[in-house]
Image: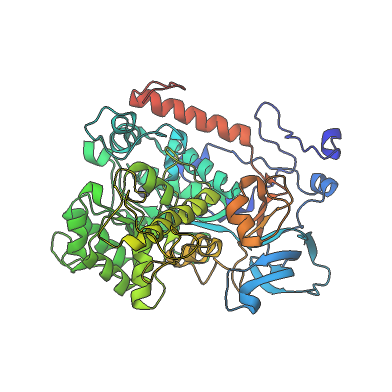
Amino acid sequence: MCKLCDEGKPQNHDDEGKPEDHSGSRRDFLKTATAAGAAAAAINLFATRPARAHDDDHGGPPEDHGKDRRRYVIRGGSVMTMDPSMPNKGELLNTDVLIEGKKILHVGQNIVAGDAAEIDARGKIVMPGFIDTHHHQFETALRSFLADGVLIKDGSTSASGTTTYFEYILLTFAPVYRPQDVYINELFGGLSQLDDGVTTVHDVSQIHHSPQHSDAAIQALFDTGRRAAFGYFESAGANILGTNPGNQYPQDAVRIKKQWFSSSDQLVHMIMGGEVYLGDATTEQSWTIGRQLDLQIAAHILSPFGIRPIMDALAQGQGGSNKDIGIGGDNLFIHMTGMSDMAWQKVQDVGAQVSIAFPIEMNMRHGMPPIIRMQSMAAAAKKPFEPSLSTDVECTMTADFFSQMRAAMNLQRLVVNQMILNSPNGNQNLPDPRNWELPQSAMTVPGPFPYWPTPPAGIPDPLTTRDVLRYATINGAKALKLDKKTGTLTPGKEADIIILDPTRINVAPLNQVPGAVVSLMDRTNVETVIVAGKIRKWKGQLLDIDLRQLRRKLENSRDYIFSKAGVPQNLFSGQ
Ligand SMILES: [Zn+2]
């Protein structure tokens, strides 16, 4: 009992960062890990929070949530199932969601649920958790270091073009990571996204200097307790410098798959990294191994690293050192900026997945996020061709998903709106590329608003809030081949659910549900987060973590990484 807690001001009852130890029971999700990495074994960052005694005082989460056959019901929310085959296209007022064990059992009104525990969601929004299809969680300790930088040194003296991603993050910082750095970076970044309502991630770990590094990354994904695709990528930076004698990429994929991913009934699964900028020999090897292991194959595809001709070869089935590697429905392509018409057509034809990192591509000079192209190709083919969303790197930009949705919607609308305004000018009188606005001699249209043309055919509709919500949920599930398990609140799927609070000062009053989520919310509105039936965030607080201890470990890792890399820490560094 605690006076402040009783007054509704929950206190963190740890002492000088020591984990609480009220119950002695280990967290369930730790038990799901099939092997303990050396890095993980030494660290206990999960406060065993008091279970019932404390929770009962505050109206804690339903007892035994997520456990086999245990039921609870989320009552009376505005439910966006994101499943258009459900009644009213899956948008349901005053609706209950019944959960049993890790699955959604039923979605409907006034569900009779016997003595199932109840979560009151009246006045709240209930929807699937967000899905991030490309995130380099190992870089969490470098957050905001590269807030101004672009991808590669560009020969200028600008702040953006001198301290850059390739030279600093990949060539300077990444090579010095130890397994324990990988572990805490991955864990902290994952928990941070759980707090934000992102219940699934594809972690492009790219930090596999040794099998111990790989095991630490995987262990952290299991320990985070959210759904994840472990992306087994290269030994970034060190691979180029040759400072990684323990490097076992890509052939260690065989051991990793066998050791960690022999079951499909677990929260974490595996994707093969098939980076094509590493050279044709590596492409040949990684794609071949990935396909032998029946894994999805993911790769960064963007023009700045010289990938356009490589992608053309892959699209023609002539990639790799034997010129026999082609793309297929098992591919997940990240960015897809600056690729040829031919390559794009092949991507669409084979049904490969595309992940767009809108804010990062806009910021770091990847090229125009290819949303207009995808919409135009979808219109031509008369079938959907849509991206999922990805956060990429927090050294430059937040991994918050509300920012993702807003950036996607606003970038697309910027382009489309300007296309419409410029449409009366045809191709005869284009705007000045220095300002992208109307040309000085802009044509006008009849009617009361001479600079307000009716949108002509051939220009995509502006994206809506429902569009980007779809990108952020079910499209992400499809991109990771998880759409049978998650991405919508369809009965039978696993319960990856977020409850959002629109009564807070940044959102109230609630007038339109999709609009409130996309246009107004941030992580302070993420009240409850559920992964496979297990409640991970409750009433605005992540459960079962010791943030002070976690942060201290991350800061220690940060200090080591900067010191070893020879980069001075400077909170007002002028880049
Ligand atoms: Zn990336």
Seen at 71% across and 64% down, the residue is 78
Seen at 60% across and 32% down, the residue is 549
Q: Position of residue 67 (x, y in %)?
A: 68, 62
Q: How is the image coloured?
A: rainbow
- Closer to the camera in the image, 464 or 127: 464
Q: Position of residue 323 (x, y in %)?
A: 13, 64
- Closer to the camera in the image, 23 or 346: 346
Q: Where 504 falls versus 267 (above or below)?
A: above
Image quadrant for the N terminus? top right
Seen at 22% across and 49% down, the residue is 278
Q: Where 86 falls versus 78 (above or below)?
A: below
Q: Where 306 falls versus 73 (above or below)?
A: above
Q: Is residue 66 visible?
A: no
Q: Position of residue 559 (x, y in %)?
A: 45, 25
Taking the image as shown, residue 28 lies to the left or right of residue 473, namely right
Seen at 52% across and 62% down, the residue is 464
Taking the image as shown, residue 322 lies to the left or right of residue 113, namely left
Q: Quadrant of residue 465?
A: bottom right
Taking the image as shown, residue 539 lies to the left or right of residue 44, namely right
